[in-house]
Image: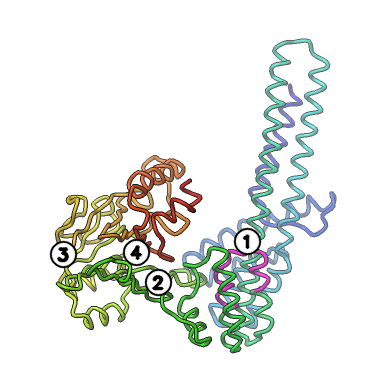
Amino acid sequence: MKKIKAINMCLFIFVIFFYILNTSLYSLEEKDFNEAIKQILASNQLYQQGLEYFNQGDNKKALDLFSQCIDKMPYHAYAHFYLANLSYIQKDFEQALVYMEKAVNHVDYMQELSTFIDQKKIGQIDAFRENLEDIWNSSNSCRDARAVEFARLHADKGESDIKLASQKRKLMMEHLKAHYFYFYGNILFQLKRIPEAFKGYKEAVKLNPQHASAYNNLAAICYLAEDYPAALSVLEEAEQNGLDELMNLKLKEMVYKAMNKPVEGILQEDLSKNSGGVLGVMRFALMIRQQDSMLPPLYENCYIVFDSDTKEAVIIDPGEKDERLENYIHEHNLQVKAVLNTHGHSDHTGANDYYAQVFNAPLCFHKDDADYYEKQPEFYPDEYRNLDVTSFSIKVIHTPGHTPGSVCFLINNFLFSGDTLFKNDIGRVWERNGKTTDVIRKDLIESIRKNLFILPGKTIVCPGHGKVTTIGAEIESNKILK
């Protein structure tokens, strides 16, 4: 049994090493392993401290620590990446390029060392199994036999976990490498080395077809070069990969205009023709700037819903001030009676106070999302099955999941679903109040089936992001809700 304990200890040491290590060696051989470990251990604390200062905005200390890190380990791709970021912030693009070239060149370094460590751990498990066989063959004790059987199961699970983690890490590393090429392209673009920047972005989308920022920049380069068909092709490829809501819709509109294609439905869309009566519905895609400047702008759908006869209106989810909203309201002589929120996230509520004040209109949201707001609303939607704020009926449907207070508004044959239901998708959920994401997601799916899928199939679903759909289409094609 001492052998078993020894092998377990060895496995434990390698697991600890795996979590400590963030990089790998080219064509590693056995004799290089100990030296690699020494370099990692010597540089890792400096890297972690540098990352903390970088996240805190203390660029001077971060620069010093990342520099010390690569002094101890020249192949530290992570440290080179952040040094490139710091130079980029200072607009020293030449120096940023030097660091970024090293980051790109050394990124495979990490994957190779991780693979080597996995092989070492699996080798230790194999040695562990051999020791178990020795114990099995040399002992007649039932107690020893049970212990060996248990240890075999433990070893099999350990190997399976290592292989699964290795697969996940490989995908993660591909995405990381894609982001490195994307940032590499950004630096080259700043240096006006446009063909090379284009290649960087192409490599990024090759490695990660979900990299929306790289697609946006590829399309922008094509547009600036007046190669409008190529720009359109890039945008269409991105949309085919499900990136509709992450694409730069302003750029898309510019490309469409340059090709004399209709732009209706890109940045705004009149849905009134589908109302079957006097109800007017306008969708405006509002650009929300994200805190991380490396991320593409997020487009959020804000809706103006009004009675064409009485001119009474509501604004649903004004995530950002946009002059188009006020212009439309004034041009059509609308009277805003309320500002409604489907949920409390800032990309849907960012201009609440502005429009509530401009139009002297009350704010309405669900009480379970009250923690997202500084001010309390004048009334909560769950106090009413129908909101009596306009000449048209507004039914409130509570659909917790994306947030605790997420609701949908049913107005005639339009369902304003916020981030609860999208075209071929549903809202993202997070662990909270002791419930796992799996449980919350399951509850959300059941809520959609129970409360939304009972509506007529022709009901028009107006989501918080992306394109309009129908209840019938989602019942038919939304794979998540099957």
Q: CA distance from mark 4 to mark 2?
A: 9 Å
Numbered badge on residue 390: 3
First along the sequence among labels 4 and 1: 1
Disc 4 marks a residue whose amino acid type is Ser
What is the quadrant of the N terminus in the image? top right
Assign a secondary structure to mark 2: strand
Asked whether the beta carbons under mark 4 and mark 1 sit within 8 Å of each other, the answer is no
First along the sequence among labels 4 and 2: 2
Q: How is the image coloured?
A: rainbow
Q: Main secondary structure of the magenta part?
A: helix
Q: Which residue is mark 2?
A: 288
Nearest-to-viewer mark from 2 and 3: 3
| Apparent side of residue 114 relative to residue 447 in the rendered image (left or right) | right
Q: CA distance from mark 4 to mark 1?
A: 28 Å
First along the sequence among labels 3 and 1: 1
Q: Which residue is mark 1?
A: 175
First along the sequence among labels 3 and 4: 4
Q: Position of residue 151 (x, y in %)?
A: 70, 25
When asked about the image quadrant of residue 64, the answer is bottom right
Asked whether the beta carbons under mark 3 and mark 1 sit within 8 Å of each other, the answer is no
Disc 2 marks a residue whose amino acid type is Ile
For the record, the magenta segment spans: 202-218
